[in-house]
Image (tube, grey):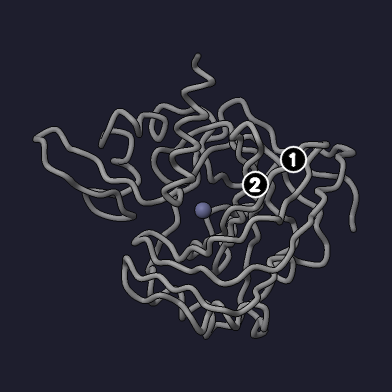
Amino acid sequence: MKLGKRFLTLAFAVTVGLCSYSYANASGGHGHWSYEGEGGPEHWGSMSKDFAACSEGKQQSPINITATESADLADIKFDYKTSELHILNNGHTVQVNYDSGSSITIDGVQYNLIQFHFHTPSEHTLNGKYFGNELHLVHKNDKGELAVVGVLIEEGKENPAFKAIWSNLPKKSGDKKDVKVAIDASKLLPETKSFYRYSGSLTTPPCSESVNWNVLKTPIQMSKKQIDAIQKIMHKNNRPVQPMHDRKVTADSITH
Ligand SMILES: [Zn+2]
């Protein structure tokens, strides 16, 4: 029963874009979660009982990746096709909804790519180090279970793969655009796709758990101008790192 409810919450969160979720506060009014002030991350868990996992969960994301256990894990099989650009600003992030037909396979289970979005600066840290931005590619399998691939983005060379997306960034909350241009999620990945894997959660309310997290070890690059362009729109939208509790991070032992 518990599992069923959890999947429902996950399915709901994905349907609304992982991020947009309003709540009724104790006085019966309506408010919204955010990244600072009264709606900030330290208050998420007490804003609504639907958000309880944000403060009570023991498998929360993001995390600081430090000690890892090496294991001979199967590669993540990426099967990404192109999509038209469906881009929106939901007030928490810039999100690109992806056309159906693209997927990843983890240990024989296929997860379909639903959307990707950005956090600035990064949410995951490597040995305490933050990156300029972090891309989350969100996938769902037939059972409604989620697998997210996190790509760390460091400041460096201008990245042409983001050109079409960046020239259509929706500036205001609620803005959305459908553009007849082909984007290719596979171009947003580093060449080397080795990864860190752990069991975590959505990094936004309702902070639902049982998300299969895969953070790629190799960052990609983006110019300062590109990082600044999205930061100017979203400001700071990264949840602080969460306690590990009893979890371990597994690193695939293959370097390719
Ligand atoms: Zn995210």
Residue located 36% across and 29% down the image? 52
What amino acid type is highlighted by mark number 2?
Ile
Give the x, y percent position of residue 220: 69, 70
Residue 130 is drawn in which quadrant? bottom right
Give residue 156's position: percent from left, percent from top: 65, 80
Q: From the top left corner, tell me how far across and down residue 154 is, in percent.
A: 63, 71
In the rendered structure, which amino acid carries the disc numbered 1? Thr
Name the residue located 58 percent from the left edge and 81 percent from the top edge.
Answer: 164
Residue 171's place in the image compared with 26, above or below, is: below
In the rendered view, tell whether residue 13 sits above or below residue 157: above
Q: Residues within 10 Å of mark 2 (few under 14, many from 20)?
A: many
Quarter of the image with the C terminus in it: bottom right
Instruction: Please tell me which residue is depicted at 73% across the width and 71% down the height of the picture.
Output: 187
* Residue on which disc 2 sits: 65
The one nearer the camera, 119 or 246, is 119
Left or right: residue 20 versus residue 253 is left
Q: Which mark is residue 68?
A: 1
CA separation in Å, label 1 and label 2 = 8 Å
- Which image quarter: residue 91? bottom left
Q: Is residue 35 above or below residue 118?
A: above
Q: Position of residue 194 (x, y in %)?
A: 81, 53
